[in-house]
């Protein structure tokens, strides 16, 4: 009898011809975590991945990481054992907890030559568990403990669900996007949602030193660190110095267009970074009507400068829906800490809410004439790794 972690995946089972590509991506992420924590060897078996746990010292830390792996549906904790009824019952009894009042047995055979069918296994193992735990009751609909028995060719799994995972598609299986990452609540959630759909992300943050301080940069790095746990690989955070452009916008353009013009310049720079890195889209945290820049008219004015698709995964979300996701993925507490970004710092008192392209372009021309045709900016790349404990 060996302790195991068993993983099943989500929608990648529907991918048919591309299924192995997605399976290999998920397998690689599981193996990377298992190897880092020295858990044991990662193996594959008919729509399942599993680890024979040889070192339990870091099991809790590892399972927290597994929960974040995109493409996984659930993780089960249990045992790999012999295909004998006595062994199955003995193993199942180890998974019953003191606080359990109800249970059910859910049996499945991939080895159809096994002498008992699934229904017979349910009945026999279930009745033996009732004998061992007379205070337990059977509940096939909402049990406290669902004990799963899987009969394979050379062995059996007896296990219990440990937790649900992030689902979605494996990270970096659907191409690459640049994401505009501010210090607010929304943009980390938008980034996470694109990661969940399999996108590799290049977070780009615009800051305006000395107007924005070191606390903001630390905040952005902390957010990127959280996101890197979901990526399960290094993220290249781009910190763009936007000061010269932002000051020119405030100095030469009509104040009410500040937000629209800032976003247009940000999109231009983000697109240059995207093209340089082979990214196929730009992601923002806009939610329709939430602030001045997020009216349909202003979104149209901002989008006009971009050739790449501008993706807005939060466009139809309410504020509380976004906050709930932020809390779930653990970026919310970081986002609400001190550190004002340049969008808020330079926000006009009376922003334009229904911008018109001609007027916006005319105001933008004033800024370009002052700065020159080549947008003046530079950026620093900060490598954020989920396996680096120093940052």
Image (spheres, rainbow, N blue to C red):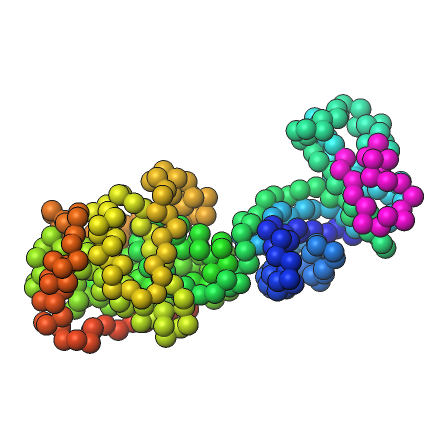
**Residue 204 figure quarter:** bottom left
Q: Which residues are magenta?
A: 105-123
Q: Is residue 300 visible?
A: yes
Relative image position of residue 196 (x, y in whole percent): 49, 54
What x and y, as percent, mark residue 241? 24, 68
Judge whether residue 27 can be spotted in this image. no
Asked if residue 117 is among those painted magenta in the image, a careful observer would answer: yes
Q: Nearer the viewer, residue 196 or 43?
A: 196
Q: Is residue 29 left or right of residue 378?
A: right
Q: Relative to residue 68, is residue 327 depicted above or below?
A: above
- The part of the image, by quadrant, that contains residue 88 is top right
Name the residue rendered at 17%, 47% in the picture: 353
Residue appearing at x 47%, y 60% in the figure: 199
Kindly indicate the quadrant of the structure image that contains residue 224: bottom left
**Image position of 314 with respect to 93: above or below:** below
- Report the quarter where the C terminus lies: bottom left
Q: Is residue 164 left or right of residue 314?
A: right
Image position of 170 (left or right of 127): left
- The x, y position of residue 255, in whole percent, is 9, 55
Instruction: Name the residue located 43 percent from the left edge and 44 percent from the top edge.
Output: 325
Closer-to-camera residue (31/221): 31
The foreground one among 117 and 387 is: 117
User: How many numbered discs?
Assistant: 0
Q: Position of residue 202 (x, y in %)?
A: 40, 65
* Residue at 31% from the left image edge and 62% from the top image edge: 205
Is 110 a magenta residue?
yes
């Amino acid at each position: 009898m060996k302790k195991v972690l068993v993983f099943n995946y989500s929608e990648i089972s529907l991918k048919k011809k591309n299924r192995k590509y997605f399976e290999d991506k998920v397998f690689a992420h599981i193996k990377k975590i298992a190897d880092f924590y020295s858990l044991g060897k990662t193996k594959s078996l008919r729509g399942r991945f599993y680890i024979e746990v040889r070192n339990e010292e870091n099991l809790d830390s590892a399972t927290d990481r597994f929960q974040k792996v995109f493409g996984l549906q659930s993780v089960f904790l249990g045992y790999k054992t012999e295909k004998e009824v006595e062994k199955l019952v003995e193993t199942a009894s180890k998974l019953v907890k003191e606080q359990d009042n109800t249970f059910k047995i859910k049996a499945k055979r991939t080895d159809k030559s096994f002498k008992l069918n699934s229904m017979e296994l349910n009945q026999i193992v279930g009745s033996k568990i009732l004998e061992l735990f007379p205070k337990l009751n059977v509940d096939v609909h909402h049990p406290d403990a669902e004990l799963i028995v899987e009969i394979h060719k050379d062995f059996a799994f007896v296990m219990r669900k440990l937790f649900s995972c992030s689902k979605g598609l494996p990270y970096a299986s659907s191409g690459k996007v640049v994401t505009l990452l501010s210090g607010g609540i929304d943009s980390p959630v938008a980034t996470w949602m694109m990661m969940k759909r399999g996108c590799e992300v290049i977070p780009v943050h615009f800051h305006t030193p000395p107007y924005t301080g070191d606390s903001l940069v630390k905040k952005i790095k902390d957010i990127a660190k959280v996101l890197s746990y979901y990526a399960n690989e290094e993220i290249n955070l781009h910190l763009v110095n936007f000061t010269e452009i932002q000051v020119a916008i405030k100095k030469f353009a009509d104040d009410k267009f500040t937000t629209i013009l800032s976003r247009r310049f940000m999109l231009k720079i983000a697109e240059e970074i995207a093209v340089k890195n082979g990214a196929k889209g730009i992601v923002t945290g806009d939610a329709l009507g939430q602030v001045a820049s997020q009216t349909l008219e202003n979104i149209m004015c901002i989008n006009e400068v971009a050739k790449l698709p501008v993706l807005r995964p939060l466009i139809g979300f309410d504020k509380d829906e976004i906050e709930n996701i932020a809390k779930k993925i653990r970026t919310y507490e970081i986002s609400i800490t001190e550190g004002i970004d340049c969008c808020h710092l330079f926000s006009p008192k009376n922003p334009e809410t229904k911008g018109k392209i001609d007027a916006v372009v005319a105001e933008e021309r004033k800024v370009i004439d002052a700065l020159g045709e080549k947008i003046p900016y530079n950026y620093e790349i900060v490598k954020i790794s989920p396996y680096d404990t120093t940052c």
